[in-house]
Image: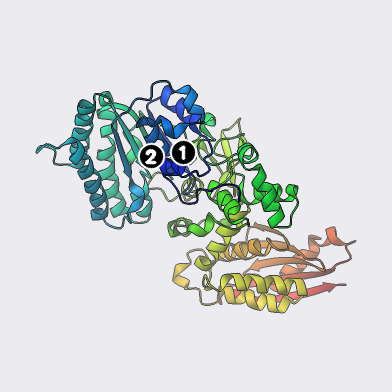
């Protein structure tokens, strides 16, 4: 390899001193610092937020030597050293109020050893306020405040409203100091995955500029296609050689797997930096970002809200919903969008409506695979093998084995866990056929108590109709009456028309009937 790729390195000083690759974002950092004072940035996990905070820390520490040959070296003339209060909330598991209080005590105690304390400062907010005031006075410069993953406690308490309320009240008072101590603060920057709004943490922080959906800062975290070609061009050719692909095929595969994040309407696509850098480091494609872990609270939100999963591929919403999460709301879409599993795919300028979808293949395939054990009785270890069997059966024309396997996905589902049986059928079928669709061509539609589906392989075409509390005969008759198979009348592949019925009594597939067109 021709470069050192910074996998897991989030400290700017270490990265620069040890010669690791750095994608230069310092022109945007300079613009941030010179045009405003209080900022918030939301980006998915592993998207470079911590490195951005560390870069700001090095800049405000006046460490000019770390910025040699970067854009900011020519832009900045003063290189003043400021007192810096840097708090990272990413290091703790927040399952009790005490866990949050411990990290606040640890951080405030560290600052108090530098800047002193006062007996009257008995709360977290008062201690924070006193530290800011003394740091400003002792250094003769206003204070820089950098808070990484500000929302980690609230995110981990989603689904536990009493605990989240305690976290919210504690952090709301703590962060309100940023506004009351304005005269002592030079610059403040908060990062997180989500933005909790309304009655939550951000309700008092109206002096923060939210740049999460600001087009001029869309490249601040993540990597653009231009940056790949500017500084990793040689490595693209090495990757192509290693994978026995052409240069054009490698560029296309990288784009399909890792590009596609749009944090602003009509903006350029952003590549997932973690997956991209891992691909170059290992010189092979993989689901690197997704395999670092998906929080279970995302699926719990989907299930609690009785969400129809088919909507997830074309969800529509407005900026108010995308920009802010009401911690008392059960709408899962803002959290899933801000966590990076959905992104902006289109925008209706007239009505201000955003169309969302999966950003790329890594996220789409990974997320749907992740959902399967939560909606069926198939465990996470067995899931990939079951999907492979489904695909084998479809490709071999063994539809009876296919439907027996599908029956097993509905078996033993606890009845008390399903509030809407029809929606449960639809969600399981959506997951299964979405996963099969990564290997064969699949079209899936639902409307009012019925589901129609087309699967196409090299040798077979399956036209299916699922009835809910009807009969398999009625389902097959509908295929014929609606001429669903007519589009394939001149196709040389073998066509199976299949009517399937679900029974609410057995909570499973009751019967299937097949009409074989040679």
Q: In front: 420, or 213?
A: 213
Which quadrant of the figure has residue 87?
Answer: top left
Q: In front: 449, or 159?
A: 159
Q: Which residue is mark 2?
A: 197
> Residue, x 73% and y 57% (percent of image)?
244
Image spot of residue 232 (x, y percent): 62, 43
> Residue, x 79% and y 60% (percent of image)?
484
Q: In front: 218, or 450?
A: 218
Looking at the image, can residue 120 be seen?
yes
Image spot of residue 503 (x, y percent): 60, 73
Image spot of residue 450 (x, y percent): 66, 62
> Residue, x 45% and y 27% (percent of image)?
30
Q: Which residue is mark 1?
A: 323
Looking at the image, can residue 473 be seen?
no
**Element at badge 2?**
loop
Residue contact at pointers 2 and 1, CB within 8 angstroms = yes
Assess disc 2: are there few (<14), some (14-19) or many (≥20) residues with their C-alpha within 10 Å of its C-alpha. Answer: some
**Which coloring applies here?**
rainbow
């Amino acid at each position: 390899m021709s470069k050192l790729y910074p996998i897991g390195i989030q400290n700017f000083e270490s990265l620069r001193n040890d010669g690791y690759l750095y994608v230069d974002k310092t022109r945007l950092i300079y613009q941030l610092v010179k045009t405003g004072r209080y900022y918030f940035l939301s980006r998915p996990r592993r998207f470079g937020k911590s490195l951005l905070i560390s870069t700001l820390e090095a800049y405000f520490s006046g460490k000019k030597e770390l910025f040699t040959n970067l854009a900011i070296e020519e832009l900045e003339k003063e290189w003043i050293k400021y007192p810096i209060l840097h708090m990272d909330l990413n290091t703790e598991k927040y399952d009790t109020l005490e866990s949050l209080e411990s990290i606040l005590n640890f951080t405030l105690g560290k600052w108090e050893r530098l800047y002193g304390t006062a007996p009257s400062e008995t709360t977290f907010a008062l201690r924070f306020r006193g530290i800011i005031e003394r740091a400003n006075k002792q250094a003769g410069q206003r204070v820089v405040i950098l808070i990484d993953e500000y929302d980690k406690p609230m995110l981990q308490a989603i689904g536990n409203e009493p605990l989240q309320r305690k976290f919210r009240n504690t952090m709301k008072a703590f962060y309100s100091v940023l506004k009351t101590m304005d005269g002592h603060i030079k610059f403040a920057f908060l990062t997180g995955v989500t933005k909790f709004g309304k009655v939550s943490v951000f309700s008092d922080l109206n002096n923060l500029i939210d740049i999460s959906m600001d087009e001029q800062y869309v490249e601040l975290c993540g990597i653009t296609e231009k940056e790949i070609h500017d500084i990793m061009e040689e490595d693209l050719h090495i990757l192509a050689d290693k994978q026995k692909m052409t240069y054009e095929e490698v560029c296309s595969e990288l784009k399909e797997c890792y590009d596609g994040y749009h944090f602003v309407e009509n903006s350029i696509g952003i590549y997932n930096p973690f997956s991209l850098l891992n691909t170059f480091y290992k010189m092979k494609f993989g689901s690197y970002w997704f395999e670092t872990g998906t929080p279970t609270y995302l699926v719990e939100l989907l299930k609690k809200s009785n969400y129809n999963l088919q909507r997830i591929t074309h969800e529509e919403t407005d900026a108010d919903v995308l920009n802010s999460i009401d911690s008392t709301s059960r709408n899962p879409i803002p959290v899933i969008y801000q966590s990076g599993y959905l992104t902006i795919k289109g925008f209706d300028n007239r009505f201000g409506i955003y169309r969302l979808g999966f950003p790329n293949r890594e996220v789409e395939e990974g997320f749907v695979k992740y959902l399967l054990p939560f909606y069926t009785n198939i465990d996470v270890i067995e899931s990939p093998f079951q999907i492979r069997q489904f695909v084998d059966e479809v490709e071999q024309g063994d539809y009876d084995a296919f439907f027996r396997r599908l029956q097993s996905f509905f078996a033993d589902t606890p009845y008390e866990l399903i509030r809407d049986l029809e929606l449960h059928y639809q969600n399981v079928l959506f997951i299964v056929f979405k996963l099969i669709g990564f290997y064969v061509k699949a079209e899936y539609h639902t409307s009012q108590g019925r589901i129609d589906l087309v699967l196409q392989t090299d040798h077979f075409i399956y036209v299916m109709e699922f009835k809910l509390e009807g009969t398999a005969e009625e389902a097959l008759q509908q295929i014929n009456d609606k001429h669903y198979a007519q589009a394939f009348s001149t196709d040389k592949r073998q066509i199976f028309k299949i009517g399937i019925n679900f029974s609410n009594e057995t909570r499973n597939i009751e019967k299937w009937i097949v009409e074989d067109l040679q």
